[in-house]
């Protein structure tokens, strides 16, 4: 695999040079209307619209084909196109590529790229819900279950995302995600995951102070208040209340019990159940902060946890990656881009850094 153009792909905070033939991405300062598949502007704008103003699906398919043809691969062009298009646009590129060249773009990249760069590129070509569904299926396949993946995905997604993941799972594997999770987990962990799968969380902004007080008391009675933790109260509250409502509940809990809810969860539970409850609490308090912590931990200590890096970058790219980047800077006094640069290398590094801009 040659990298004919890699020298022309330098990334610095302020500018990006592109291989010849690429159009300059719209400057961050220019507002870009983000169109959904229906052609209407999306209600939820990402922190920064990633789309080129002049997205040209024919041109992109042609560029990608050229990048993979002949001797050596032009990784710079692949990075440029994948990192600066929305998920929706990448789906259009895939369809165009197949129609024009009679090959799946995934298969072409699978054979042209390698390592973590390949993993990330292929993950970006999946719809977010399909990518999550594949992660969940992989976590349950074969011997043993990777509960950490189940917990991470189901505890951090919105109702709409969970519904989309369930549909994608059924479509891809012709199985029900809920029955697979019921078969593969047990006890209290199974109960909280199944509660979350109902996608029944209140997503409104109203806070009911009285309810917060009652919930705080229920959580206390269920956990610290007696021997053994009554998970039903935890499931009911943590899986169903809105994040704003939960914040009020945690404050009421602190006043009632004199300690933080996280301390009580750590004292009362263990293992994957504890992880699930803690993620639910942390996401309710500050979802971007939770992911900033995940990224920081994946790059500190011995070795880098590339799976976590890829998972967070790919699934948050159009949701809140820009917010996570700001939160990371605020919490750790370090730039996320700089840390990625010092912890990863090669085309994998270049693709991650490009996703951050």
Image (spheres, grey):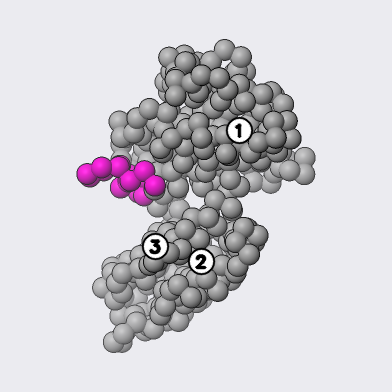
The label nearer to you, 3 versus 2, is 3
Look at mark 2 in the image and give the residue it sits on. 245
Q: Position of residue 61 (x, y in %)?
A: 66, 28
Q: Residue at x 59, y 53 (%)?
A: 129
Look at mark 1 in the image and give the residue it sits on. 85
Q: With 217 as the anchor, is 73 left or right in this view?
A: right
The reply to whether callout 3 and callout 2 are in contact (CB within 8 Å) is no
Q: Position of residue 285 (x, y in %)?
A: 43, 58
Residues drawn in magenta: 293-307
Between the C-alphas of marks 3 and 2, the distance is: 31 Å
Number of callouts: 3
Judge whether residue 29 can be spotted in this image: no
Q: Position of residue 33 (x, y in %)?
A: 69, 34
Q: Residue at x 36, y 43 (%)?
A: 306
**Would you say the magenta stretch is mainly helix, strand or loop?**
helix
Q: With 232 as the anchor, is 21 left or right in this view?
A: right
Question: SS of the residue at dot 3?
Answer: loop
Does 336 appear in magenta?
A: no
Q: Earlier in the sequence, mark 2 or mark 1?
A: 1
Between the C-alphas of marks 3 and 1, the distance is: 31 Å
The label nearer to you, 2 versus 1, is 1
Q: Residue at x 29, y 87 (%)?
A: 227
For label 3, count other residues whose C-alpha is less than 10 Å away and answer few (under 14), some (14-19) or many (20+).
Answer: some
Between the C-alphas of marks 2 and 1, the distance is: 35 Å
For label 2, count other residues whose C-alpha is less than 10 Å away and answer few (under 14), some (14-19) or many (20+).
Answer: many
The label shown at residue 146 is 3
Of 112 and 117, nearer the camera is 112
Asked if 288 appears above or below 233 in the picture, the reply is above
Does 302 appear in magenta?
A: yes
Q: With 40 as the anchor, is 2 left or right in this view?
A: left
Residue 85 location, quadrant: top right
């Amino acid at each position: 695999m040659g990298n004919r153009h890699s020298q022309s792909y330098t990334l610095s905070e302020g500018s990006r040079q592109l291989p010849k033939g690429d159009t300059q991405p719209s400057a961050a300062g220019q507002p870009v209307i983000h169109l959904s598949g229906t052609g209407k502007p999306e209600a939820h704008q990402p922190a920064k619209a990633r789309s080129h103003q002049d997205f040209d699906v024919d041109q992109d398919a042609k560029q990608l084909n050229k990048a993979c043809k002949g001797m050596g691969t032009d990784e710079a062009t692949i990075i440029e196109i994948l990192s600066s298009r929305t998920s929706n646009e990448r789906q259009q590129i895939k369809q165009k590529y197949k129609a024009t060249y009679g090959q799946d773009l995934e298969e072409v990249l699978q054979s042209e790229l390698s390592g973590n760069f390949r993993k990330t590129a292929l993950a970006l070509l999946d719809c977010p819900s399909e990518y999550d569904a594949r992660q969940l299926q992989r976590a349950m396949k074969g011997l043993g279950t990777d509960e950490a993946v189940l917990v991470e995905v189901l505890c951090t997604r919105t109702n709409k995302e969970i519904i989309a993941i369930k549909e994608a799972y059924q479509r891809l594997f012709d199985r029900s995600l809920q029955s697979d999770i019921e078969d593969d987990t047990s006890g209290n962990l199974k109960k909280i995951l199944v509660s979350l799968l109902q996608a029944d969380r209140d997503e409104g902004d109203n806070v009911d102070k009285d309810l917060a007080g009652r919930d705080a008391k229920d959580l206390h009675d269920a956990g610290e208040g007696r021997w053994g933790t009554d998970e039903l109260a935890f499931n009911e509250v943590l899986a169903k209340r809105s994040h704003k409502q939960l914040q009020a509940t945690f404050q009421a809990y602190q006043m009632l019990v004199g300690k933080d809810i996280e301390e009580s969860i750590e004292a009362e539970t263990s293992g994957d159940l504890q992880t699930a409850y803690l993620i639910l609490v942390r996401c309710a308090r500050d979802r971007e902060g939770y992911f900033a912590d995940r990224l920081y931990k994946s790059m500190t200590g011995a070795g880098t946890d590339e799976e976590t890096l890829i998972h967070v970058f790919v699934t948050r790219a159009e949701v809140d990656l820009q917010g996570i980047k700001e939160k990371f800077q605020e919490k750790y006094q370090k730039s996320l881009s700089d840390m990625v640069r010092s912890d990863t290398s090669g085309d994998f590094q270049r693709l991650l850094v490009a996703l951050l801009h």
